[in-house]
Image (spheres, rainbow, N blue to C red):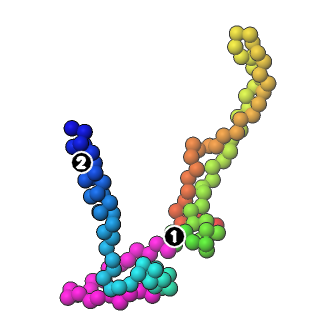
Amino acid sequence: MRSINVIFLLCLAVMFITGCGSIPEPKDGRTMRDIYDQQMAGITAPVERSARPAQDVAVPQYHRYTREAKTEIENLFPRLPNPTLYMYVRPHTVGIDGLPIPGYTVPFSMYERDQHAMPGEVAP
């Protein structure tokens, strides 16, 4: 019984290793470095035309919401005001022995969580 388990685990390991080793290569001969360099330079690879007519599809523009060095400085999602309230606790005694506790102030936010505005909702 033990030898069957060892053989099964060995076969499973071999299938796993051979499955990881088969990485598909690009069909046009370009390397990943070439593809990366083209994308970073803003050059796109030539697009093959299909027999179907091209449809005008609106591509969403996410550049306003993407993190870049330029947009990191600007706050696209400003924090909405969350005022700090202060509660004063009067001096009191605690426990059976009546230990005196001096008065103190506790700061807390009005809202439980900070909320953020969508871009353009709050005037700067």
- Residue 84, given in percent of the width and then of the height, sits at 68, 45
- Magenta stretch containing residue 54, yes or no? yes
What main secondary structure does the magenta stretch of the protein show?
loop
Pick the quarter of the image with the N terminus: top left
Kindly tell me whether residue 39 is visible in this rendering. Answer: no
In the picture of the structure, the residue carrying the numbered disc 1 is 66
Q: Position of residue 121 (x, y in %)?
A: 54, 64
- Between the residue at mark 2 and the residue at mark 1, the CA separation in whole angstroms equals 48 Å
Residue positioned 35% across, 78% down in the render: 58
**76 displayed left or right of 3:** right
Using residue 27 as the reference point, say whether residue 107 is left or right of it: right
Name the residue: 78% across, 27% down.
103
70, above or below 91, in the image: below
> Dot 2, how many residues are within 10 Å of its Cα: few (below 14), some (14-19), or many (20+)?
few
Q: Residues within 10 Å of mark 1 (few under 14, many from 20)?
A: few
Q: Nearer the viewer, mark 2 or mark 1?
A: 2
Left or right: 6 in relation to 37: left
Q: Residue placed at 75% from the left, 20% from the top? A: 92
Mark 1 residue type: Thr
Q: Judge by depth and name the residue closer to the eye, 102 or 39.
A: 39
Describe the element under mark 1 as helix, strand or loop. Answer: loop
- Amino acid under disc 2: Phe
Q: Earlier in the sequence, mark 2 or mark 1?
A: 2
Q: Position of residue 96 (x, y in %)?
A: 70, 9
Q: Is residue 18 above or below residue 108?
A: below
Task: Give residue 99's mark.
Answer: none
| Residue underneath mark 2 | 8
